């Protein structure tokens, strides 16, 4: 099984549309960050988590040929606004793509992008909405991935965390309930929100992400959702060996 970090930037990416780089060295290509999303490949089974506004670039850069399922963490624009870019995969497959989200997120997606789900105005529906369960399996022929999901706090809303194959993906989060922390103990990989140096009301900051990594005794922690005040080389040079910053296009074998 392989994971590709398609995007590891915060909601504005890096650089911002105004060419603001913050503390990031613009000469380092690993500081060029698109919005958060990952791709999971298990043999012929392809799963994407979130469809960022940068999905087209992410798909082309990583030479991704197909998407079988899409999981969503939450409804915010930096996680969902690329949803209409899934249309060519529908045309290629000639069948609807199954997406999975919690009840609130699914309703918002169906309202906001109704033509993708219901058609109309000359559009053919391309997506089929599914409510996520606490435990579920996605499969294609003989390939399958087992997922565990649970809600985490993301400011005033909830986001969904996913665990699969001894790996957790929690891209947008500022608090995790004790009962769910137990599910994250001793994982091989933890891909976790780490927005800024300073504290933030809806994201973990650097110190909080480091604390979580120690608490959970994870073998390898990968920091994502990185703001422009977190330079790649600075993080790489100052983090413990088992904690690394993500970069767009990072590949992880699990």
Image: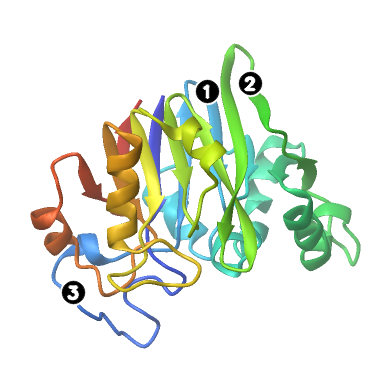
Foreground residue among 147 and 53: 147
Query: Badges 2 and 1: C-beta atoms under 8 Å apart?
Result: yes
Foreground residue among 61 and 181: 181
Is residue 63 depicted above or below 223 in this figure? above
Residue denoted by label 1: 44
Position of 213 with respect to 147 (left or right) is left
Foreground residue among 203 and 61: 203
Q: Report which quarter residue 225 is drawn in.
A: bottom left
- Residue shown at 12%/61% (left/top)? 233
Q: Residue furthest left?
A: 237
Secondary structure under badge 3?
loop
Distance CA(mark 1)–CA(mark 3):
37 Å
Q: Position of residue 60 (x, y in %)?
A: 43, 51
Q: Quadrant of the N terminus?
A: top left
Query: Badges 2 and 3: C-beta atoms under 8 Å apart?
Result: no
Residue denoted by label 2: 140
């Amino acid at each position: 099984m392989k994971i590709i970090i398609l995007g590891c930037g915060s909601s504005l990416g890096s650089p911002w549309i105004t060419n603001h780089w913050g503390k990031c060295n613009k000469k380092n290509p690993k500081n060029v960050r698109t919005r958060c999303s990952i791709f999971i490949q298990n043999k012929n089974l392809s799963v994407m988590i979130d469809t960022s506004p940068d999905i087209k670039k992410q798909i082309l850069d990583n030479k991704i040929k197909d998407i079988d399922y899409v999981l969503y963490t939450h409804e915010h624009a930096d996680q969902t606004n690329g949803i209409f870019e899934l249309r060519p995969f529908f045309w290629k497959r000639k069948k609807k793509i199954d997406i999975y989200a919690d009840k609130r997120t699914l309703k918002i997606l169906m309202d906001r992008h109704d033509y993708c789900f219901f058609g109309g105005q000359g559009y053919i529906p391309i997506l089929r909405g599914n409510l996520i369960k606490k435990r579920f399996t996605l499969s294609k022929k003989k390939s399958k991935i087992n997922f565990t999901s649970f809600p985490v706090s993301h400011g005033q809303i909830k986001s969904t965390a996913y665990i699969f194959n001894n790996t957790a993906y929690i891209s947008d989060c500022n608090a995790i309930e004790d009962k769910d922390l137990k599910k994250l103990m001793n994982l091989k990989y933890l891909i976790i929100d780490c927005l800024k140096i300073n504290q933030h009301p809806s994201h973990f900051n650097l110190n909080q992400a480091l604390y979580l990594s120690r608490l959970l005794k994870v073998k390898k922690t990968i920091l994502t959702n990185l703001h422009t005040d977190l330079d790649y080389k600075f993080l790489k040079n100052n983090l413990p060996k088992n904690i690394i910053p993500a970069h767009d296009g990072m590949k992880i074998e699990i």
